[in-house]
């Protein structure tokens, strides 16, 4: 039950990746919408030239993140039914990494912009540094540190039932 063909594995990998991209896409689109609305607010006139530069970096990074995260959909449309799922999964994986990188820049500069508007600049830089370290920890360090979670062979793909049996066997010890 835990064995799948290579084609099934590519299909599953693509479906998993698309689900991950849906989550990231929602976040980046909300941030992008917020950034698009910011210049039409009354307070935007009070921003400094430096803060407007921060705004432009955040806006462009959010736009690039949106493009990278949505690009696998367009790529899939162009390759639909052409037997190119492995190439599609590899491309989508790279675009997910690029999109998350751009989203990190957008989030960081958005935090910096807002905190710099509200607080003294040194405090803004400190809070932004904390936020960036938080994102890097959750999005990079922790996943890389946990790559070897589990004791199964990385090429072995377990069914949900097999995973449940292994987890239950370990907790019964």
Image: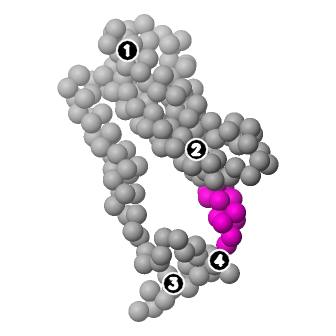
Residue 4 belongs to magenta span: yes
Residue behind mark 3: 166
Q: Position of residue 137 (x, y in %)?
A: 33, 50
Q: Residues within 10 Å of mark 4 (few under 14, many from 20)?
A: few
Residue found at x 30% / y 33%: 128
Residue behind mark 4: 3
Segment tinted magenta in the rendering: 3-16
Residue found at x 34% / y 45%: 136
Q: Give the mark nearest the N terminus, 3 or 1.
A: 1
Q: Residues within 10 Å of mark 2 (few under 14, many from 20)?
A: some
Residue behind mark 2: 91
**C-alpha separation, residue under disc 3 versus residue under disc 1:** 52 Å
In front of the other: label 4 or label 3?
Answer: 4
**The C terminus sits in image quarter:** bottom left
Q: Position of residue 106 (x, y in %)?
A: 43, 30
Q: Tell me: 165 left or right of 146.
A: right
Residue behind mark 1: 53
Q: Position of residue 115 (x, y in %)?
A: 32, 26
Q: Residues within 10 Å of mark 3 (few under 14, many from 20)?
A: some
Q: Tell me: 149 left or right of 157.
A: left
Numbered disc 1: secondary structure: helix
Q: Give the mark nearest the N terminus, 2 or 3.
A: 2
In the rendered structure, are the residues bearing label 3 and label 1 in contact, judged by CB atoms less than 8 Å apart? Answer: no
């Amino acid at each position: 039950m835990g064995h799948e063909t290579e084609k099934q594995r590519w299909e599953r990998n693509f479906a998993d990746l698309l689900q991950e991209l849906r989550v990231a896409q929602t976040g980046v689109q909300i941030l992008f919408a917020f950034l698009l609305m910011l210049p039409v607010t009354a307070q935007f006139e009070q921003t400094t030239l430096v803060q407007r530069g921060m705004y432009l970096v955040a806006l462009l990074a959010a736009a690039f993140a949106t493009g990278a995260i949505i690009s696998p959909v367009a790529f899939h449309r162009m390759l639909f039914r052409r037997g190119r799922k492995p190439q599609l999964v590899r491309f989508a994986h790279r675009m997910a990494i690029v999109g998350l990188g751009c989203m990190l820049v957008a989030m960081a500069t958005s935090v910096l912009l807002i905190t710099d508007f509200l607080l003294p600049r040194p405090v803004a830089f400190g809070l932004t540094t904390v936020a960036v370290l938080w994102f890097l920890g959750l999005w990079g360090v922790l996943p890389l540190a946990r790559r070897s979670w589990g004791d199964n062979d990385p090429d072995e793909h377990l069914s949900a039932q097999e995973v449940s049996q292994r987890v239950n066997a370990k907790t019964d010890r």
